Image: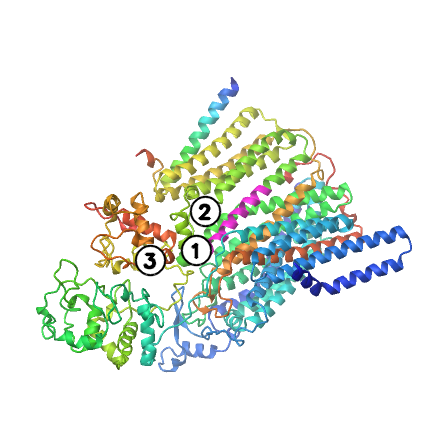
């Protein structure tokens, strides 16, 4: 309050000085005591109102950026002073009353705006069109770390995860638990050994026992360690490390999604960055960008290579999906197909998480004595499973595998739409029409 | 007799011919300029034409044209020579964004908004003038004709001072652009250079016409000259409208660019750059918005003069003026939502993402404010009409029923502003236990919300019908049946509206969205059929007493001021929404805003700046009004001799 | 008596009119107004 008064005086002192000068002038000039008292009173009102006005301005100034909800108070103060003026200065009474009323209306509307939840749109993501080709190995490796873990220096942080989503299944540090997929420590050296594995069939990929024998017809098998890494990204089924296949397939099928395909869709440049990091972090010399690119070009046909997006189209205030996109796009954006098989959604054949036949699954789960969640209905169960995956973990699947931040990256509308779709999937019934959800 | 008619007809023909000649002369510069512009070359289009010409001529000779690249239009997908420079890539430096120790964007925001307020005011008022002057011309009642003419003159008088202020503010706006956003403004003017020149020429033409129109009012008051004078208002409005369309093209270009390739290089077709995806919807929306706004400002002027009036005559005149201005403003307010709907649909068609940001994303709460304001506008209109019943003998018949209307309006408003789904943070989502509020989520269904606003509009229509009947009783033979039918029709319309609103809960979403059409149709039925039936019934009527203009409670005038302020505020709000939907783009997807202010402020901050703009505008315009009144005091105007408020029986044309 | 007659006529016409436009305008959009009955 004292601050406000000092501020008001420091802004408005010329006006006060003028008004007080006027007061003195009237006292000297006017001889009639009634007139003099009248003039003195009016100037006093003037000083009072000027003081209020400058208080209001000071309040506005002080809180302009910080506490914008305090600004309507200024407007109300001005309303008060115009009404006071309107009472005592009758010749401009109408003007003052109208002005005051307008200030009051504006104060109410401003106050309303400030009372609503305050959403601020953050800055746009910086415009970076990464030029992987001209980077030094260290720069490439840094980009790779960002893609895998979401940020520089995040590789040591438990649970850090980036666009590539690799740490969902893979362990990256020596000794880290890595149940679902091989630990990738020392992979540059081990890749060479894998080529000699009895099940790899480097010379004759057709002899493999896996569900997919080549990345694409005629691509052949890897000849070098780097090519092995590239092949594993492009065609996880081509070789399954024993013990890491989809349960019940006897290691013939891998649960890993193809990384260049939606929803992860890493470009060749990004894949090169990821691979470079794998070498650089162990102090090994990485193959050049061109060599890595060549290794991927061998396993990913030109038509399948994702294009680098211009960037900037994901600037919806931190929300990944808004719920207005077609259902397939929505699933892809959210990344569900990387781990789940979702009937009716193209490319959604993930094996890491359970099959999402939720119209049939959810009622059974709710009946499970082990269920401790709060859901009462199918829809509630699905919503709960998305927002709070650890509330109930389906048998034979590990906990803490699914990201817990879907509440942050999906809008309510998006969650709603996903729930709509999943709850309509029932075993033994026709698939719902995709168009109904677009 | 026949001769007289003949003479009149000849005068009319002459007037119309004169009008066309004048219009053609004023529009000449554009027609002359257009072919040159469309060709993409010409001396006006700037530096590279020699290359273009060379490229065109040397089409057969390869190798010569290597200098000019071919670019592809981002919107029209046509190809053209990339004659312009690419959009500059800015960085957060003093070079691209010179600045004071304050947010440049807010400075520009204020400068833009003030120019826009004054601009729309001076564009809207001549339209009213035109309507009122013609109403006076065709009116058979001499006293009424004189009264209308005086009113039109008063309107123009107000806009004249505002006109010079508009020009000054336009200058300030350009300086703000040049000093704070030189890179962006340079790019924009490199594309729109010829348009900007035409704009300036049109501005000169507009000024000339306006001054002749105003100062020639007394000289051109009879016969042919009067017709010519009235025709001049048409020309004035044509020029004003073209001016606004041109200015809109820049905004349209910023929101939905066309005529340039992906790098922002101008492709030589200015019509593509003007005629962007959102240009026409913006044009229509802005014209209607300007008129509603202009009506509000004039109504506020009338209210000011009413409240400061010294005698009954003045009070009567300004009461009447306020009523006319309010009616015009509200008349244009009613189609405004439809134009808004069209604009929104085009936005969705242009970029889905943009529509989502507006209606369901970052800016969605601002639309909640807008919904509230629409409700307030209608409530205030109703309040004014009920107050206005007080100046009519017989108006008190309706008083007991006002409370029921208030009830319907309040319930309608509450339903209307209830949100359904909105972007939430996860914490909010968890706190609410789902995507929708456990209680309110059930009410925010679209058909119910439409029901709310339709109930409000229908009630407003009913209030208007009351007002028309204020001092009159229908005397047609079928009056009894008519009354019963009219009441039943409105009651059933309301019931149907409520039924459809509730029905929406029981049917799936894809069927539900169709319900809005019958709902709107019901409201329109009330508007057209209800008013028509009422007018038919009043065609033969018994008067209970005169309309006592000026005998209205002063609080009614505050309703007018409320309307005006709310219009202004809403205009500021919608302008803010329209501008901020580009998020971090100067020109959507072409030129990025890399200034430190390329983020969206909180709603509260936005609301405060809007309030500041509104109040700044009103303080300055009240000052203009005050100046006008000051001038009027010095020169006693004998013109107001045909006292508008004379209690002589008056025809109903004013209603 | 006359009033009651007029009232009945009015109600019949109004209700018929509004139900008709509800149905017709839904039908024009290819939607089923009587969805709930089926």
What segment is highlighted magenta in the picture?
Answer: B357-380
**B61 displayed left or right of B160:** left
Q: Nearer the viewer, residue A55 or B336?
A: A55
**B80 displayed left or right of B542:** left
Q: Quadrant of residue A155?
A: bottom left
Q: Are marks 1 and 2 in contact (CB under 8 Å)?
A: no
Q: CA distance from mark 3 to mark 2?
A: 27 Å
Secondary structure of the residue carrying tag 3 is loop
Which label is found at residue B419?
2
Q: Residues within 10 Å of mark 2 (few under 14, many from 20)?
A: many
Image quadrant occupied by the N terminus of chain A: bottom right
Q: CA distance from mark 1 to mark 2?
A: 13 Å
Which label is found at residue A404?
3
* Nearer to us: label 3 or label 1: 3
Subunit of mark 1?
B
Q: Residues within 10 Å of mark 1 (few under 14, many from 20)?
A: many
Residue named by callout 1: B361
């Amino acid at each position: 309050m004292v601050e406000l008064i000092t501020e008001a005086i420091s802004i408005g002192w010329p006006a006060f000085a003028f008004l007080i000068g006027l007061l003195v002038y009237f006292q000297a000039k006017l001889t009639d005591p009634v007139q003099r008292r009248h003039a003195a009173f009016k100037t006093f009102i003037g000083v009072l109102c000027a003081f209020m006005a400058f208080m209001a301005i000071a309040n506005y100034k002080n809180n302009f950026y910080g506490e914008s909800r305090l600004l309507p108070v200024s407007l109300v103060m001005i309303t008060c002073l115009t009404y006071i003026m309107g009472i005592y200065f009758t010749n401009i009474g109408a003007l003052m009353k109208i002005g005051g009323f307008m200030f009051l209306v504006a104060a109410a509307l401003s106050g309303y705006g400030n009372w609503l939840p305050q959403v601020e749109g953050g800055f746009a993501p910086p415009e970076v069109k990464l030029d992987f080709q001209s980077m030094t190995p260290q720069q490439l490796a840094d980009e790779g770390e960002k893609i895998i873990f979401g940020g520089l220096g995040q590789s040591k942080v438990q649970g850090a995860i980036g666009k590539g989503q690799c740490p969902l299944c893979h362990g990256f540090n020596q000794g880290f638990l890595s149940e679902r997929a091989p630990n990738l420590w020392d992979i540059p050296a081990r890749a060479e050994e894998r080529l000699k594995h009895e099940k790899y069939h480097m010379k004759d990929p057709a002899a493999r026992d896996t569900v997919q024998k080549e990345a694409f017809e005629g691509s052949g098998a890897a000849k070098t360690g780097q090519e092995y890494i590239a092949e594993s990204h492009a065609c996880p089924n081509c070789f399954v490390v024993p013990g890491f296949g989809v349960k019940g397939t006897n290691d013939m099928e891998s649960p890993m999604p193809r990384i260049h395909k939606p929803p992860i869709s890493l470009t060749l440049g990004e894949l090169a960055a990821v691979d470079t990091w794998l070498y650089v972090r162990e102090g090994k010399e990485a193959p050049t960008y061109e060599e890595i690119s060549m290794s991927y070009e061998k396993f990913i046909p030109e038509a399948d290579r994702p294009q680098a997006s211009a960037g900037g189209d994901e600037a919806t205030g931190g929300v990944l999906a808004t719920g207005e996109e077609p259902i397939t796009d929505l699933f892809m954006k959210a990344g569900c197909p990387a781990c789940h098989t979702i009937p009716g959604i193209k490319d959604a054949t993930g094996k890491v998480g359970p099959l999402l036949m939720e119209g049939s699954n959810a009622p059974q789960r709710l009946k499970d004595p082990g269920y401790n969640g709060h859901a009462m209905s199918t829809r509630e169960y699905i919503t709960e499973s998305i927002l709070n995956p650890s509330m109930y973990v389906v048998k034979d699947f590990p906990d803490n595998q699914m990201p817990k931040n879907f509440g942050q990256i999906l809008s309510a509308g998006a969650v709603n739409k996903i729930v709509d779709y999943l709850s309509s999937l029932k075993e033994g019934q026709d698939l719902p029409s995709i168009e109904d959800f677009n | 007799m026949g001769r007289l008619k003949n003479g009149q007809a000849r005068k009319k023909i002459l007037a119309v011919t004169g009008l066309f000649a004048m219009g053609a002369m004023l529009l000449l510069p554009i027609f002359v300029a257009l072919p040159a512009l469309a060709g993409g070359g010409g001396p006006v289009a700037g530096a590279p034409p020699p290359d273009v010409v060379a490229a065109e001529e040397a089409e057969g000779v390869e190798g010569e044209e290597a200098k000019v690249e071919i670019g592809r239009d981002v919107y029209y997908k046509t190809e053209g020579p990339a004659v312009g420079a690419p959009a500059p890539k800015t960085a957060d430096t003093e070079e691209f964004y010179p600045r004071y120790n304050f947010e440049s964007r807010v400075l520009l925001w204020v400068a833009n908004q003030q120019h826009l307020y004054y601009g729309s005011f001076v564009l809207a008022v001549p339209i009213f003038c035109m309507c009122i002057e013609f109403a006076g011309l065709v009116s058979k009642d001499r006293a009424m004709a004189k009264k209308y003419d005086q009113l039109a003159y008063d309107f123009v008088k107000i806009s004249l001072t505002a006109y010079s202020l508009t020009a000054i503010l336009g200058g300030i706006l350009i300086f703000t652009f040049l000093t704070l956003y030189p890179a962006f403004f340079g790019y924009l003017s490199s594309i729109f250079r010829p348009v900007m020149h035409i704009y300036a020429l049109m501005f000169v033409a507009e000024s000339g016409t306006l001054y002749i129109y105003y100062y020639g009012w007394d000289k051109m008051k009879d016969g042919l000259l009067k017709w010519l004078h009235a025709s001049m208002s048409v020309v004035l409005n044509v020029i004003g409208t073209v001016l606004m369309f041109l200015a809109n093209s820049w905004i349209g270009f910023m929101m939905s660019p066309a005529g340039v390739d992906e790098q922002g290089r101008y492709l030589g077709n200015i019509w593509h750059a003007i005629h962007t995806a959102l240009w026409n919807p913006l044009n229509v929306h802005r014209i209607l918005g300007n008129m509603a706004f202009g009506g509000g400002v004039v109504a506020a002027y009338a209210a000011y003069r009413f409240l400061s009036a010294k005698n009954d005559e003045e009070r009567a005149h300004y009461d009447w003026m306020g009523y006319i201005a309010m009616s015009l403003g509200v008349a244009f307010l009613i189609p405004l939502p439809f134009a808004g709907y069209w604009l929104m649909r085009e936005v969705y068609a242009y970029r889905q993402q943009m529509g989502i940001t507006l209606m369901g994303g970052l800016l969605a709460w601002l639309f909640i404010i807008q919904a509230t304001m629409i409700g307030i506008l209608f409530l205030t209109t109703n309040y004014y009409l009920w107050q206005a019943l007080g100046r009519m003998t017989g108006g008190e018949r309706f008083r007991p029923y006002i409370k029921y209307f208030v009830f319907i309006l309040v319930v309608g408003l509450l339903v209307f502003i209830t949100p359904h789904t909105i972007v939430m943070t996860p914490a909010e989502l968890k706190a609410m236990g789902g995507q929708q509020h456990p209680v309110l989520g059930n009410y925010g269904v679209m058909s119910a919300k439409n029901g709310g606003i339709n109930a409000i509009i229908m009630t407003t229509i009913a209030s208007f019908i009351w007002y028309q009947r204020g001092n009159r009783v229908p005397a047609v033979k079928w009056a009894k049946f008519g009354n019963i039918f009219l009441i039943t029709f409105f009651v059933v319309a309301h019931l149907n509206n409520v039924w459809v609103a509730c029905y929406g809960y029981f049917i799936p979403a894809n069927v539900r969205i169709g319900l809005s059409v019958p709902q709107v149709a019901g409201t329109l039925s009330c508007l057209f059929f209800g008013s028509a039936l009422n007018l038919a019934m009043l065609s033969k009527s018994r008067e209970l007493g005169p309309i006592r203009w000026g005998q209205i409670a002063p609080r009614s005038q505050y309703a007018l001021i409320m309307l005006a302020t709310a219009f202004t505020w809403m205009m500021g709000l919608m302008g803010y929404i329209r501008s901020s939907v580009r998020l971090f783009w100067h020109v959507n997807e072409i030129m990025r805003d890399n200034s430190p202010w390329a983020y969206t402020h909180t709603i509260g901050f936005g609301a405060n700046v809007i309030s500041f703009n509104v109040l700044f505008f009103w303080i300055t315009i009240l000052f203009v009004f005050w100046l006008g009144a000051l001038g009027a005091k010095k020169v006693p105007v004998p013109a107001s001799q045909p006292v508008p408020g004379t209690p002589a029986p008056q025809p109903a044309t004013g209603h | 008596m006359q009033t009651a007659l007029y009232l009945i006529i009015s109600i019949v016409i109004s209700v018929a009119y509004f139900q008709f436009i509800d149905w017709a305008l839904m039908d024009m959009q290819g939607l089923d107004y009587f969805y709930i009955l089926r």
